[in-house]
Amino acid sequence: MTCPPAARLWTISASGESESSLQLGYKVIGEERFVFVFDFADSRQENLDPELAGVSGRTVTIAYPEDAVSELGEEFDYYAVSRLGGQDVDQCPGDSPLDDRARFPG
């Protein structure tokens, strides 16, 4: 019997000028990749092309389409978390209950 691969999830929760709140995400389960935007206001998730995500070594880069995130405006507050197998393992910025965990570089 083989165990299923642990899901890896990176999210950025952002609140914009117009009080909009979005979660930008990238999820990997085995060989499957998912890029999404979740709108907290209407509990709606938009799944995007996984090819928007580029991975180089330990760096994930995603260019979200402007129409998917424009409601945030030019300035927004954010909080980012990475999860492995359902457990938070990293966060940015560091003022959270996860302060004793490793932090994103920089």
Image (spheres, grey):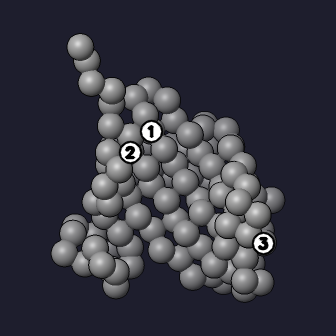
Residue at the limit of the structure toward the top, as seen here: 1
For the point 38% across and 73% down, the residue is 92
How far is mark 3 from mark 2, CA to CA? 27 Å
Precedes in sequence: disc 1 or disc 2: 2
Rendered image: mark on residue 71: 3
Rendered image: mark on residue 28: 1
From the viewer's perspective, is 65 left or right of 51? right
> Regarding mark 1 in the picture, which secondary structure is present there?
strand
* Quadrant in the picture for residue 69: bottom right
- From the image, tell me which residue sits under label 2: 8
Q: Position of residue 5 (x, y in %)?
A: 33, 30
Q: Position of residue 2 (x, y in %)?
A: 25, 18
Precedes in sequence: disc 3 or disc 2: 2
Q: Position of residue 62 (x, y in %)?
A: 56, 52
How far is mark 3 from mark 1, CA to CA? 26 Å
Q: Position of residue 6 (x, y in %)?
A: 32, 37
Q: Within 10 angstroms of label 3, few (less than 14), some, or many (20 or more) residues?
A: some
Count up the numbered dots: 3
> Regarding mark 3 in the picture, which secondary structure is present there?
helix
Amino acid type, residue under disc 1 in the picture: Val
Q: Within 10 angstroms of label 2, few (less than 14), some, or many (20 or more) residues?
A: some
Q: Are marks 1 and 2 in contact (CB under 8 Å)?
A: yes
> Regarding mark 2 in the picture, which secondary structure is present there?
strand
For the point 74% across and 69% down, the residue is 41
Image quadrant containing the N terminus: top left
Q: Is residue 5 visible?
A: yes
Q: Is residue 58 visible?
A: no
